Image (cartoon, rainbow, N blue to C red):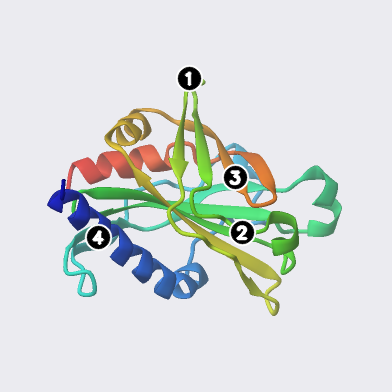
């Protein structure tokens, strides 16, 4: 049976993917990352997590109501085996934000790997690859990436960036809105890796702020 509601939602998702793909370079270049020179920032005083709005209104390209929060730092990670080569940088930095288009809500991950050769170690962030979010009570949810990203290398900066786009179900939103996150596990083309989350209430705060808009 033809389902006009599902077709409409599918069209929104496809339009959003197109906009994200077009604007990815611009978004990554202006992303907020952790300050690599501040060690206390990760242990005693996490980067302030708030609900700064990037956009709230009718998107001129999509023609629909959009609410988007500013991306904020979520986690950093350096594998012990490469620590001695990283100097004052982290190997991986990840910012995140909540984005809502009409009735569809997304979690966006903005990943920066401080190596221009990251594609050899990580590969692609494939369409359908999962993000595992582990909460402070030991429970977890799985989210599916909806757009393949091969990574964008910037050799002048020595970085490779990726973006993951993860639609959230009603259950996902409920869990994210009431629990803190301890760990994020990402399925890369070359394997699965788990990362400790430093800003463990970022998504909870943005989800709850979204409910009040």
Secondary structure, mark 1, is: loop
Tell me, for residue 79, which label it has, or none.
none
- Whichever of callouts 3 and 1 sits on the residue coming sooner in the sequence is 1
**In this figure, which residue is indicated by the disc labeled 4?**
12
User: How crowded is the residue under tag 1: few (<14 C-alpha within 10 Å), some, or many (20+)?
Assistant: few
Query: How far, Cα to Cα, is label 3 from label 4?
Result: 25 Å
- Whichever of callouts 4 and 1 sits on the residue coming sooner in the sequence is 4
- Quick one: 2 or 115, which is closer to the camera? 2
- Whichever of callouts 2 and 4 sits on the residue coming sooner in the sequence is 4
**In this figure, which residue is indicated by the disc labeled 2?**
124
Secondary structure, mark 2, is: loop
Q: Quadrant of residue 91?
A: bottom right
Secondary structure, mark 3, is: strand
Query: How far, Cα to Cα, is label 3 from label 2?
Result: 10 Å
Percent coordinates x, y for residue 143 in the rendering: 44, 41
Residue drawn at point x = 45 percent, y = 59 percent: 147
- Asked whether the beta carbons under mark 2 and mark 4 sit within 8 Å of each other, the answer is no
- Whichever of callouts 3 and 2 sits on the residue coming sooner in the sequence is 2
Tell me, for residue 187, which label it has, or none.
3
């Amino acid at each position: 049976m033809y389902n006009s509601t599902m077709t409409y939602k599918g069209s929104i998702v496809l339009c959003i993917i197109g906009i994200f793909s077009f604007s990815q370079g611009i978004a990554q270049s202006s992303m907020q990352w952790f300050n690599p020179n501040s060690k206390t920032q990760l242990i005693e005083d996490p980067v302030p997590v708030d609900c700064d709005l990037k956009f709230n209104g009718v998107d001129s390209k999509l023609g629909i109501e959009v609410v988007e929060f500013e991306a904020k730092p979520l986690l950093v990670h350096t594998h012990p085996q490469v620590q001695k080569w990283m100097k004052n940088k982290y190997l991986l930095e990840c910012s995140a934000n909540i984005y809502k288009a009409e009735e569809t809500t997304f979690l966006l991950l903005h990943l920066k790997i401080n190596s221009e050769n990251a594609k050899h170690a990580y590969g692609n962030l494939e369409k359908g690859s999962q993000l595992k979010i582990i909460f402070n009570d030991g429970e977890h949810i799985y989210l599916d990436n909806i757009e393949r990203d091969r990574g964008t290398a910037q050799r002048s900066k020595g970085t490779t960036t990726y973006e993951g786009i993860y639609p959230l179900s009603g259950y996902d939103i409920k869990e994210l809105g009431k629990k803190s996150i301890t760990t994020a596990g990402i399925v890369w083309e070359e394997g699965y890796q788990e990362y400790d989350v430093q800003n463990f209430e970022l998504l909870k705060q943005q989800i709850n702020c979204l409910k009040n808009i």
